[in-house]
Amino acid sequence: MRKKILAGNWKMNTTIEEGTSLYQEVQKGWNEIGSQDLICIIAPPSTHIFQLASATNEHLFLAAQNCSEFAAGAHTGDLSAQIIGSAGAIYIIIGHSERRAHHGESNQILQQKVNLTLQADLYPIYCCGESETDRDEGVQNQIVLDQLKEGLFHLTADDFGKVVVAYEPVWAIGTGKTASPAQAQDMHAFIRKSVEEHYGEEAALNLSILYGGSCNPSNADELFAKADIDGGLIGGASLKAKDFIAIANSLKA
Ligand code: PGA
């Protein structure tokens, strides 16, 4: 059966010193929750991964927020999936809307990143989600389906089994505007159905689909109560250990 996952995306926040103390607080809170069924993934700035990796365990993992679409070589400033893995991360967030929008990352580029992540024996957290205009025009399902088809559906069933999907409507990220639980559930069910059509029922049932976009301690209960929402990808609220752990308690419930 699929896993419940709470992931914190710290984005470009925290120095190593700040990040280390935030991580220790999260770790302490997570240990207190003590649930065997929950997985916590923290995606700090990549510079922090090596240092924080010494304190990971079977329920607490590290992710990078991005990787290069190239395997190695003359790509100044980039980090390959393999290098990220060697620092101690297990997951890589691929296709966050900020990367799609600010770095021109197309579904085709993201497909390369997914492939390299898997080749490095790491797990992709593949982000998808529509813009506000897409939703106003009623094309949100088509946009998300294209993102899935072009970025993921080339994978073998075995490799697809290693993927986590995060649905993050662009209009809800960092805006304080959360998708309503019903809107999020509709999209998660649509994603699961699309996966079922492509990979079959078992793959669809085993896929963890996280919701992201202004999720916080006051709306997490309602979101996580929905049948197809298996966790969250948390931005702003992951920078406060207390809020992140409160969201984890909602997921545990
Ligand atoms: P937010 O960000 O929780 O601050 O909206 C979510 C994300 O970008 O992953």
Image: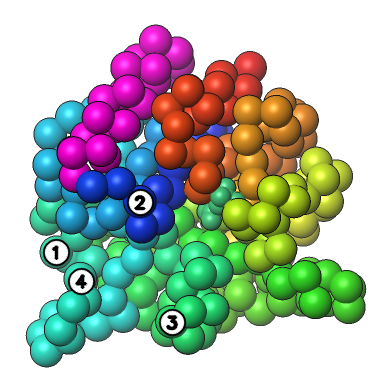
Residue found at x 83% / y 51%: 183
Residue, x 36% and y 57% (percent of image)? 12
CA gap, disc 3 and disc 2: 18 Å
Label 3 and label 4: CA atoms lie apart by 16 Å
Q: Are marks 3 and 4 in contact (CB under 8 Å)?
A: no
- Residue in front for this viewpoint, 222 or 71: 222
Real-space CA distance between mark 1 and mark 4, rounded to the nearest whole angstrom: 5 Å
The overriding secondary structure of the stretch rendered in magenta is helix
Q: Nearer the viewer, mark 3 or mark 1?
A: 3
In the picture provided, is 21 more to the left or to the right than 96?
Answer: left
Name the quarter where the C terminus is drawn. top right
Mark 1 highlights which residue?
83
Position of residue 1 relative to residue 121, above or below, is: above
**Circle 4 residue:** 80
Is any atom of residue 25 visible in this view? Answer: yes
Residue identifier under label 2: 13
In the rendered view, tell whether residue 42 sits above or below residue 87. Answer: above
**Total numbered circles:** 4
Q: Are marks 1 and 4 in contact (CB under 8 Å)?
A: yes
Measure the alpha-carbon separation of dots 3 and 1.
Answer: 21 Å
Q: Give the amino acid type for the residue marked by disc 3 in the picture.
A: His
For mark 4, give the secondary structure. Answer: loop
Is residue 154 in sight in this rendering? Answer: no
Name the image quarter holding the N terminus.
top right
Which mark is nearer the camera, 2 or 4?
2
Percent of width and height locating residue 56: 22, 32
